[in-house]
Image: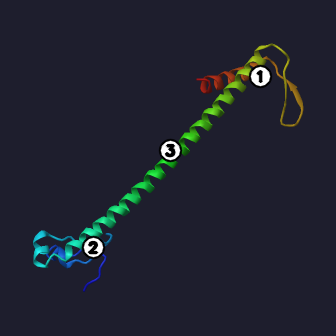
Amino acid sequence: MVFSDRAPPTNIPDNAIVKRPGATQLAPVVRPDEAASSGGAALPVAASSAAKSAGIDKELLEKKNKADAEVAAKLKAEEQRVMAAKAENCQRAKSSKAGLESGVRLSRVNAQGEREILDDAARAAELKRAQAVIDSDCK
């Protein structure tokens, strides 16, 4: 018997190969002419192996479907979270724009913690930023 991680030469018949490298163990293939010569004893084994593999495939399919459903649910939840964040950003941008357009004197706190009044240039920049958020999130 020879053990190797390489495929056997092409002159070796398939029935002499116990397991191919890198492949999972499959049930032996029983040909009708071989089954008749061996007395038919191999057919029930092959049938039970086929039933087991069909059961495994069914379980695998159920697990795959369940995993796909979970992934789809996560994607939908993430999409809903993003849509809610966009709606909130849209509302904030609209109220900010309304406040900036009202003409009321506005102030903000700078990096040093000091209060500064918005001049016309700063007000225009803030209006432009608010409008950009409205354009991107309010669809």
Please name the colour scheme applied to the rendered image.
rainbow
Nearest to the observer: residue 103 or residue 120: 103
Locate residue 31 relative to residue 7 in the image: left or right.
left
Q: Secondary structure at mark 1?
A: helix
Q: Earlier in the sequence, mark 1 or mark 3?
A: 3
The C terminus: image quadrant:
top right
Percent x, y for residue 135?
A: 61, 22
Mark 2 crowdedness (10 Å alpha carbons): few <14, some 14-19, many ≥20: some
In the image, is 51 to the left or to the right of 71? left
Lateral position of residue 99 relative to residue 26, left or right: right
Residue at figure coordinates x 59%, y 36% from the top left: 80
Q: Label 3 near label 1: C-beta < 8 Å? A: no
At 72% across and 26% down in the image, what residue appears? 92
Amino acid type, label 3: Ala
Residue holding disc 2: 20
> Which residue carries the number 1 mark?
122
Identified by mark 1, the residue type is Ala
Q: CA distance from mark 2 to mark 1?
A: 73 Å
Q: Which residue is mark 3?
A: 72
Query: Which dot, 1 or 3, sits closer to the camera?
Result: 3
In terms of secondary structure, where does tag 2 sit? Answer: loop
- Viewer-proximal residue among 42 and 13: 42
Residue occupying image coordinates x 18% and y 76%: 15
Secondary structure under the numbered disc 3 in the rendered image = helix
Q: Residue 84: where, in percent of width, then height?
A: 64, 33
Tell me residue 55's x, y (percent).
36, 62
- In this rendering, the answer to whether 118 lies above or below 79 is above
Report the amino acid beneath label 2: Arg
